[in-house]
Structure formats: structure tokens, C-alpha cells
Image (cartoon, helix red, strand yellow):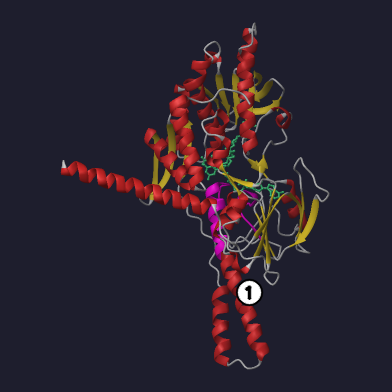
């Protein structure tokens, strides 16, 4: 009995402590303190973007020595790794986003945030022009501001290879609005297929979901769609659910070229079990309103009718990035992205740093790379801040005419330390992807080698890895609540 009492007391103590810590963290997240005002004597850092690169830079930057201005058409950070789950309602859209102001309001010094799209960068005169592209416009909609340093992190746009009809008829999966659109169009296809007296041929077309691109985006989406079919559609749309067909089209001989061979085979066999048709060595050549034209390895072409088409064939540079490259023709010679040095400085420009998907480096365009670059760049700015501070001190000492040689030498030493930078080093933490039916794949760099694992355990690892990297306690709480809601009640099949 005494044992039970002790256990009860320890449990109660643990619950009270955990609740206290949770409340403390949430309160400090929700109620930021006072900030220092911007200081005209400090240099201005303009940050373009609010994605992985920009947000990790902002989060780690000490704003004491800088006036920071953020410009992005999206006023939030989006946790892209879980975006495929939004397309079928496993997760709710707002669970994956964090307002940029939430991030900047926790900085030491006031940070200016503008919801706008940067239109041009002038690397000679060091200015950025940006424009309000939202629906509601004020009298002032475009402005040009100077920068002392520019952090360029605008990411990429969707690659279409100029294939006709893609932009008009396909859905992409990059932004939150894309996932919402897919969710709505998917339900529209299903409702239309279930419409009274729909012909058999039309039901088959409407229930055919085609995914183009067998990279991780296409594979994860196909996996989520399969789960939706098995867990929910069969229950709520028994009359048409069995007609749902998923086809993944990939130009290369296999899906997921960046994963290890064993995991590629595991994914392809899981897809086979799940009746997801994988057409490899097949390229989409043309996209119509209701069908795509594909060409196989024998150069034979055929039409595939579809209801919903999701296009996931990778990235290409944004127009503003191409424009910036054209202003620096001697050094910016790769269409794939901006060329930077080992310290993430843009080649050919002064005081411009570029990070993330908009750059052409030896690394894959991933969130992991962009966020590590953001952290590294914040450390470069910490040194820059010190350098500026010691330069000012040195100038004051020299101007005073009374400073001793020792005083001056001590500041010169500090200045020299602040100017020494180590190059960026990327540390790969592994690759993870969800492939449906509660299975994930994981390529992990462990024990001086690579450990490849696929299945339910990898799915639990995938979930815990992503929950722990979500931006805030609020995001973690929302995502875990969404998972619990789906387990208890299933996914919501209503169409907004
Ligand atoms: P982004 O995160 O795309 O951010 C770019 C920012 O710039 C955005 O805020 C955008 O609004 C803004 N912007 C655009 N144009 C302008 C402009 N003209 N002016 C100012 N701002 C502008 N990577 C992984 O490592 N692991 C994963 O599991 C993973 N899963 C993914 C799943 C999906 C569905 C997708 C689409 C990507 C996934 N990625 C993953 C890749 C990862 O999301 C990108 O590599 C990462 O977002 C790149 O970060 P970034 O900061 O360069 O660009
Ligand atoms: P991707 O570039 O990785 O894959 C695109 C695929 O589309 C390629 O395999 C390509 O061969 C194929 N393709 C191109 N044109 C085609 C055509 N006309 N017809 C048929 N197939 C065609 O693109 P994805 O998946 O969008 O990923 C972009 C980046 O984001 C990658 O670096 C990826 O690693 C990262 N990412 C990582 C994730 C993860 O780690 N879980 C999840 C999603 C994205």
C-alpha cells in the first residue's frame, strides 16, 4: 500500500512538473518581451524569403549589431516535410506553419517584416525593390530600399521543362495553397465520380490519380493517397472507392534515385502490394485537360486519362534569380542556381549571401541543407557584427589621439579574430520518406557507414524525427493532435 502511495505521489509530481514546464514554454512562446528599437548607426540586413534557409538564419541571428528587414510574399514559415499529409487531411494546414512575426518578435532588436515579393535586386547600388502582390492593395504597393548586407533565400519554383499544359491543368505540391487545392480537387473528383448515372468510363477517368515524378515528393504523395483510400474512402464512398487507381510516372529506371538501392526496391514492392502502378522509364510529354500523353522506353506514346494530376518533377530557378544572374554574367553561369563560395557569398557581388534551393552547390536542394546554411550564416554575421564593432572602436581609439599602443593592439587582435571565418561544412543527418500504409524508409549515416531501414519502425522514427524538428511547441501540439484525431475519427472527407 505504501508502495502504491509513493508511486501515486511520484506520478502526480511528474504530471505537475511536466504541465508547469509546458505552460512556461507556451507562455514564453506566446508572449514575447520588449525589443530594442532599430538603430540607424547599425548596418541593415535585408532577408529575402521566409522558408527553411531564411527562418533558420533569423532564428539563430544575434540582432544586436544589425537592423533586420524581412521581405517575403508568404508571412509564415512552412514545414514542408509534412506537407504531403495535408493533401488528404491527415494533417491540417495550419499545424505546419509558424508566422514570421512570431519568429522575429522574439529577437533582441525590432525586425521589420514586409509581406511582399522582391522584384529586383541591384547588386551594384545595393538595393532591393519589392511589391505587395496580395489581393488587398494600399496606395503604396512598391518600394526600393538600400541594404548593407543581403541574405538571398527565395527558394525555387516548380520545374515543368516547358511541357505544354502543365501549368494549366496539373496541381503542384510546394506551397500550403497547393496542398489545399489538391485536397479539394481530389474530393471533387470523387464526388463527381459518385454523381448519378456517371458512365463507367468517366468514373474510371475521374478516379484515376496520376502523379508525375518519382522523387520523394511524388512518392510521399502517392503513399498518403493510398492511406486515404484504404482508411477512409472505402468507408464513406463504397460505391466508387474500389475504382480509385494511383499511377506514378517516372522518367528514370526507378523511383527515389537519391535513396539506397535496397530502399528503392522496398518502396517499389510496397507500392506493388498497395496497387500503386509505377511506370518507370516513362516520360510525360504533353498534358491535356483530361489526359496526359506519355512516352515509354520504346518511344511508344499513349494517352492516360486522369481525374487529378499532381506534378512533382523538381525545382527550377525563380525569375528574380535569373534576373540577378543576368546582372552578374561573368560569375553567374549556372542556370541551376546561384553560384556561391565556401562562405555562402554570392560570386561577383559585394555583401550578398545566398542560401538554400536558390543556389547551385554540390548539395541536394533540401531543408536540411538550407537550415544548416542558415545556422552557419548567422555565425558569419556574429563575426561580421564583432568586426564592425571593433573597427568602430579602433577608429575611435585612433581619433582620440590618447590611446596607448597596447590598447590599439588588443583591439586589432580582436578584429583579426573576428575576420577569420571557417568555410561552411554540411553534415548529412540522413534521408527519410513516408511511403504509405504506416511504413517509411530511412537512409541513415551511422557507424561510419549507411544504415538503410524500411517499415513500421522507420515510420515511428520518421514521425518522431519530424515532430522534434517542428518549429514550436504549438506546432508539435497541433501535429500530434491531428494524428490522434485521425486515429480516433478518421480523415474529414468534406470539401471546403
Ligand atoms: P523555401 O523553403 O522554399 O523558402 C523560400 C521562401 O522565399 C518562401 O518563404 C517564399 O515565399 C519566399 N519567396 C519566394 N519568392 C520570393 C521573392 N521574390 N521575394 C522574397 N521572397 C520570396 N527537404 C528535406 O530535407 N526533408 C524533407 O523531408 C523534405 N520534404 C519536402 C516535402 C515537400 C512536399 C517539398 C516541396 C519539399 C521538401 N523538402 C524536404 C525540400 C525543402 O522543402 C526545401 O529544400 C527547402 O524548403 C529549401 O529551403 P529554402 O529556404 O531555400 O526555400
Ligand atoms: P526530384 O527532383 O527529387 O524528383 C523529380 C523526378 O521527376 C525525377 O526522378 C525525374 O526523373 C522525374 N521527372 C522529371 N520530368 C519527368 C517527366 N516529364 N515525366 C516523368 N518523370 C519526370 O523532385 P522532388 O521530389 O520534387 O524533390 C525536390 C527536392 O526536395 C529534392 O532535393 C528532394 O530530395 C527534396 N525532398 C525531400 C524529401 C524527403 O527527404 N523526404 C521530400 C520531398 C522533397
Residue 95 is inside the magenta segment: no
Examine the rendering and report whether any part of residue 215 can be seen.
no
Q: Position of residue 292 (x, y in %)?
A: 67, 23
Q: Does 297 sit above or below residue 321?
A: above
Tell me which corner region of the image, top left, top right, bottom left or bottom right, holds residue 399. bottom right
Q: Is disc 1's CB within 8 Å of ligand 1?
A: no
Name the image quarter holding the N terminus: top left
Examine the rendering and report whether any part of residue 178 can be seen.
yes
- The residue shown at (68%, 23%) is 293
Residue topped by disc 1: 388
Tell me which corner region of the image, top left, top right, bottom left or bottom right, holds residue 308. top right
Q: Nearer the viewer, residue 383 or 485?
A: 485
Q: Does 437 sit above or below residue 407?
A: above
Q: Position of residue 470 (x, y in %)?
A: 50, 46
Callout count: 1
Q: Position of residue 468 (x, y in %)?
A: 45, 46
Q: Position of residue 482 (x, y in %)?
A: 49, 34
Name the image quarter holding the C terminus: top right
Tell me which corner region of the image, top left, top right, bottom left or bottom right, holds residue 157. top right
Q: Nearer the viewer, residue 204 or 14?
A: 14
At label 1, counting other C-alpha atoms closer than 10 Å, the crowd grade (few under 14, some 14-19, many 20 or more) is: some
Q: Nearer the viewer, residue 387 or 467?
A: 467
Q: Is residue 49 left or right of residue 440?
A: right
The quadrant where ligand 2 appears is top right
**Magenta stretch in the rendered image:** 353-379
- The residue shown at (53%, 41%) is 81
Amino acid at each position: 500500500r505504501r508502495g502504491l502511495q509513493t508511486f501515486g505521489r511520484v506520478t502526480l509530481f511528474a504530471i505537475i512538473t511536466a504541465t508547469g514546464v509546458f505552460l512556461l514554454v507556451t507562455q514564453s512562446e506566446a508572449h514575447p518581451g520588449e525589443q530594442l528599437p532599430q538603430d540607424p548607426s547599425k548596418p541593415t540586413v535585408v532577408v529575402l524569403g521566409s522558408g527553411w534557409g531564411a527562418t533558420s538564419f533569423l532564428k539563430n541571428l544575434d540582432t544586436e549589431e544589425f537592423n533586420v528587414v524581412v521581405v517575403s510574399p508568404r508571412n509564415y514559415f512552412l514545414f514542408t516535410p509534412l506537407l504531403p499529409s495535408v493533401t488528404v487531411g491527415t494533417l491540417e494546414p495550419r499545424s505546419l506553419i509558424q508566422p514570421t512575426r512570431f519568429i522575429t518578435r522574439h529577437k533582441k532588436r525590432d525586425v521589420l517584416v514586409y509581406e511582399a515579393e522582391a522584384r529586383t535586386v541591384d547588386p551594384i547600388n545595393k538595393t532591393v525593390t519589392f511589391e505587395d502582390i496580395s489581393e488587398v492593395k494600399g496606395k503604396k504597393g512598391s518600394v526600393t530600399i538600400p541594404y548593407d548586407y543581403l541574405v538571398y533565400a527565395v527558394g525555387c519554383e516548380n520545374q515543368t521543362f516547358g511541357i505544354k499544359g502543365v501549368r494549366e491543368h496539373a496541381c503542384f505540391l510546394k506551397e500550403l495553397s497547393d496542398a489545399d487545392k489538391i485536397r479539394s480537387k481530389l474530393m471533387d473528383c470523387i464526388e463527381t465520380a459518385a454523381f448519378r448515372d456517371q458512365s463507367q468510363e468517366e468514373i474510371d477517368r475521374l478516379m484515376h490519380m496520376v502523379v508525375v515524378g518519382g522523387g520523394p515528393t511524388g512518392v510521399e504523395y502517392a503513399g498518403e493517397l493510398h492511406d486515404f483510400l484504404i482508411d477512409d474512402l472505402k468507408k464513406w464512398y463504397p460505391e466508387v472507392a474500389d475504382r480509385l487507381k494511383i499511377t506514378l510516372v517516372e522518367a528514370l529506371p526507378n523511383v527515389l534515385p537519391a535513396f539506397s538501392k535496397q530502399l528503392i526496391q522496398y518502396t517499389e514492392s510496397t507500392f506493388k502490394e498497395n496497387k500503386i502502378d509505377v511506370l518507370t522509364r516513362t516520360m510525360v510529354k504533353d498534358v491535356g485537360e483530361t489526359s496526359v500523353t506519355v512516352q515509354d522506353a520504346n518511344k511508344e506514346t499513349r494517352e492516360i486519362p486522369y481525374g487529378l494530376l499532381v506534378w512533382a518533377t523538381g525545382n527550377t530557378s525563380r525569375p528574380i534569380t535569373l534576373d540577378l544572374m543576368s546582372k552578374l554574367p561573368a560569375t553567374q553561369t549556372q542556370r541551376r542556381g546561384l553560384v556561391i563560395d565556401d562562405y555562402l557569398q554570392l560570386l561577383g557581388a559585394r555583401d550578398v549571401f545566398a542560401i538554400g534551393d536558390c543556389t547551385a552547390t554540390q548539395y541536394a536542394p533540401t531543408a536540411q541543407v538550407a537550415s544548416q546554411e542558415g545556422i552557419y550564416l548567422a555565425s558569419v554575421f556574429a563575426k561580421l557584427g564583432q568586426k564592425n564593432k571593433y573597427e568602430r572602436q579602433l577608429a575611435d581609439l585612433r581619433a582620440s589621439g590618447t590611446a596607448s599602443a597596447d590598447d590599439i593592439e588588443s583591439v586589432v587582435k580582436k578584429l583579426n579574430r573576428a575576420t577569420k571565418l571557417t568555410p561552411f561544412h554540411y553534415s548529412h543527418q540522413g534521408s527519410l520518406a513516408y511511403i504509405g500504409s504506416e511504413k517509411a524508409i530511412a537512409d541513415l549515416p551511422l557507424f561510419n557507414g549507411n544504415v538503410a531501414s524500411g517499415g513500421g519502425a522507420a515510420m515511428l522514427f520518421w514521425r518522431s524525427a519530424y515532430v522534434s524538428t517542428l518549429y514550436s511547441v504549438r506546432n508539435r501540439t497541433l501535429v500530434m493532435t491531428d494524428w490522434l484525431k485521425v486515429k480516433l475519427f478518421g480523415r474529414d472527407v468534406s470539401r471546403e
